[in-house]
Amino acid sequence: MLVVLCTRGGRSLAVLNALRFRRSYHAGVGVFGHLPEPPKSTFEPTAGMSPEQAQRIHLINAYRRYGYLRADLDPLGLAKRKEVPELDPAVYGLAAEDDLPGKSLTLNDLNAQLANIYCGPIACEFMHINSWEERQWFASAFEDSVASELQNGDRKKLAELMLRCENFDHFLALKFPTVKRYGSEGAEAMYGFFSEIFHGAPEKGIQQVVVAIAHRGRLNLLAEMMEFPLTQMFRKMRGKTEFPPGVQGSGDVLSHLTSSFDHASAEGKVHVTMLPNPSHLEAVNPVAMGKARGRSRSLSLGEYSEERGARVGDGVLCVQVHGDGAFTGQGVVWESIALSQAPHFRLGGSVHLVTNNQVAFTAEAHVGRSTTHTTDIAKAFECPVIHVNGENPEEVVKATRLAMAYREKFRKDVFVNLICYRLRGHNELDDPTFTNPRIYKQVQSRESVPRMYADELISEGLTTEEEIKKLKDEHTAKLMDVFKSVDKSEPSVKHLQGLWSGFKQAPPSVERWDTGVDSDLLRFVGAASVKTPDGFNLHSHLKKTHVEARINKLTQGEGLDWATAEALAFGSILLDGQDVRISGQDVGRGTFNHRHAMLVDQEGDNIFVPLNNIEAAQKGKIEVANNLLSEEAILGYEFGMSIENPNR
């Protein structure tokens, strides 16, 4: 708590700080782990618009709302571009040859410009968002993004990155032909997304990035962008021992490997953590959300900061990568997005990438979902969606920049739908032509995305065929050196580091620990667990059955109920400087009307959490996280919170 040293607006900083850690149960004015909502901006409509201007605005808004339906998004050219009547100027009483007042162009010119912006290889959906401010911002930012160009140096780096990732797949196909590696061939533009995230994060004050990604392209990302030791990866592919002697562990499949590292660039440094991935698709995503939230608590950032002006999402970014089939089909996706703006669960927005192969195992889109796009469920939560053709890597970078800018300003989830293809089957041993011959005739007739982009740069004089050959030869030589060293290498492990460095592997013997607490301290904690501030309007029934009853039990030293014992345990842990977080749909009160860890003022509707006010010097905090009626996502989220820090 802050000491009263100065005042602001007639209120002491101590009072203002205390108010931050209260929250109206229904309105939201702040409690530990949940900052009050900032005031919403208001829209003042422009008066005096002429009928002709209104007609043109209708046409412009039609492109903003429906343009994505006509966009050139399928790299294979198999998806039929829909006819959209709303994009016809005649619908609004406009003729193509009409001149625009004060402009040296016709309506036909305007229509062509709108089609170029909203119906090209990058498109967006944002008009479903209720906030006028968000819609206006997104329209302006998207139009600026389409008109922007990447610097030539960035374009060359992008080409080199994709060529290395492609070459990595080719090397593994040659040296490990029977290994299921789930390569990124056909989706290499996704690495432009990651490059922009890693380079752009420091400019937005982001210190930590937590990544959830399934199998597609995971090994390429680890090897080429996340500094995973290739020797250890190749050891696993060769079936060698993963752990040094004495280290217990069963290992996992190749596509679940993980890494964390510091990404340094001219823009600054950011720590990137990729979580282990289970084969249960999308199960890792809520875990990453919880991990990111826990990281905010560990660093006292965002909703755990005591800095005036702190915002949810400060300093920590969650990046979630999905497959198109799983994103549509798995209920945990809906549950996870539903958590994204809920008190005690929000992250200030995740940036999502859907690696949309247009086929899930063998199921094509028309049997894999009931919606136009796999990302349509995101619209239920008023999240913007940016669709991009996977054969246009520069547009992927632009989409990522736009997504990061939106997240930075509005602190909400945003989705990039990368529409690409999968060069091979679900894995490299699978033949997709059995079930998807039409798609794979197109796939097999195409140059790769990295090759097409490299040819574009060659035609512009930004690189040469000789430079590309040199890049690939040097990359192959590096991989070959590692490959040759595998038999001489030793296994290594990186667990029990950082915050977990004080821990060690459990010994085979059973140990007993004295976890008792002095009885006087327990009585002190018990009394504090039902103490309310002066002027707090406690419910009369709770005063008798909860507060007075607990004090009597503590005084007599017998008949302690479950809730009292729990409060004593929680309070003693908090006084040791450890955090406690309880999560559930009714954890504040308790399902059986027994806990009452949070008390609600009967007049002001404000929450007070007694266990967060045991003593002034208290460092540990309890976060009472009432939540939505979710099962799988909540379980994953809380697991993610728990693995971030041993002091929680």
Image: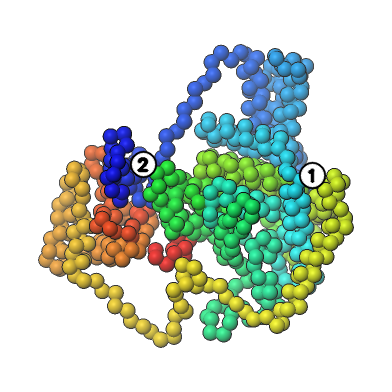
- Looking at the picture, tell me which residue is in the foreground, 596 or 18: 18
Q: Secondary structure at mark 2?
A: loop
Q: Position of residue 282 (x, y in %)?
A: 57, 58
Q: Residue at x 88, y 57 (%)?
A: 466
Q: Position of residue 303 (x, y in %)?
A: 42, 49
Give me the C-alpha separation between circle 2 and circle 1.
Answer: 49 Å
Q: Quadrant of the C terminus?
A: bottom left
Mark 2 or mark 1: whose residue is earlier in sequence: 2
The part of the image, by quadrant, that contains residue 450 is bottom right
- Looking at the picture, tell me which residue is in the foreground, 594 or 524: 524
Q: Position of residue 247 (x, y in %)?
A: 53, 81
Q: Secondary structure at mark 1?
A: loop
Q: Is residue 477 visible?
A: yes
Note whether 495 is above or below 197 in the view shown: below
From the image, tell me which residue sits under label 2: 28
From the image, tell me which residue sits under label 1: 77
User: Crowding at label 2, few (<14), some or many (≥20) Cα neighbours within 10 Å?
Assistant: some
Number of numbered callouts drawn: 2
Q: Position of residue 196 (x, y in %)?
A: 65, 50
Identity of the amino acid at label 1? Gly
Identity of the amino acid at label 2? Gly
- Looking at the picture, tell me which residue is in the foreground, 645 or 111: 645
Return the residue found at the far front.
Answer: 5
Q: Residue at x 78, y 58 (%)?
A: 163
